[in-house]
Image (tube, rainbow, N blue to C red):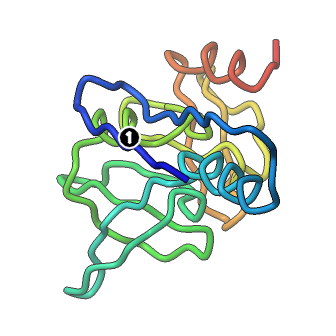
Amino acid sequence: MKVECKISTDYKESYAVLHINKMTETIAKIISILEKENVNSVTLIAAKDRKAYFIKQEDIALVRTEGREIVCYDKFKNRYTLDKPLYELENILDSCFVRISKSAIVNISQINHVEASFNGTMELVMKNGIIDYISRRFRKSFKERLGLK
């Protein structure tokens, strides 16, 4: 089998085209691997106790600013610091993440429940027990994202 690979920064997203004369089990496995390539492929490098950790995005529950630090909490409530600004992380992380305030992004799949709070905000409780608030400014886009009215 001939294999050709073109690498270019001109491509916005990686894609593969296969020209085959018949489907085989090996090719089916290769297709499966390629389809999973972009799903949950983002891994962030985070710091904790002067050590670097590689955290998969599906393990991240919440990313927010705390003082001058950008921190993320994983699904086990471990706290890590990140070296990227929040707006950059919002662009890196996939569609499972949504902005809830000027200072926080959450993983939709890690939300336990949401309830109305004071001053038009909404209280968001993560599965790991962390509580944050959806600001009035981001409430409408958050609800649209979840398909709520």
Left of 38 or right of it: where is 118? right
Q: Is residue 34 above or below residue 121?
A: below
Residue 48 location, x and y as percent? Answer: 30, 80
- Number of marks drawn: 1
Left of 37 or right of it: where is 92? left
Q: Residue at x 55, y 51 (%)?
A: 37
Q: Is residue 5 above or below residue 49?
A: above
Amino acid type indicated by mark 1: Ile
Q: Residues within 10 Å of mark 1 (few under 14, many from 20)?
A: some
Left of 116 or right of it: where is 80? left
Q: Residue at x 63, y 52 (%)?
A: 36
Q: Residue at x 30, y 54 (%)?
A: 66
Q: Nearer the viewer, residue 58 or 119?
A: 58
Q: Is residue 20 above or below residue 64?
A: above
Q: Nearer the viewer, residue 19 or 119?
A: 19
| Residue marked by disc 1 | 92
Residue 133 location, x and y as percent? Answer: 56, 39
Q: Quadrant of residue 95?
A: top right
Q: Residue at x 54, y 45 (%)?
A: 38
Residue 118 location, x and y as percent? Answer: 64, 29
Q: Quadrant of residue 13?
A: top left
Residue 116 location, x and y as percent? Answer: 75, 30
SS for callout 1 = helix
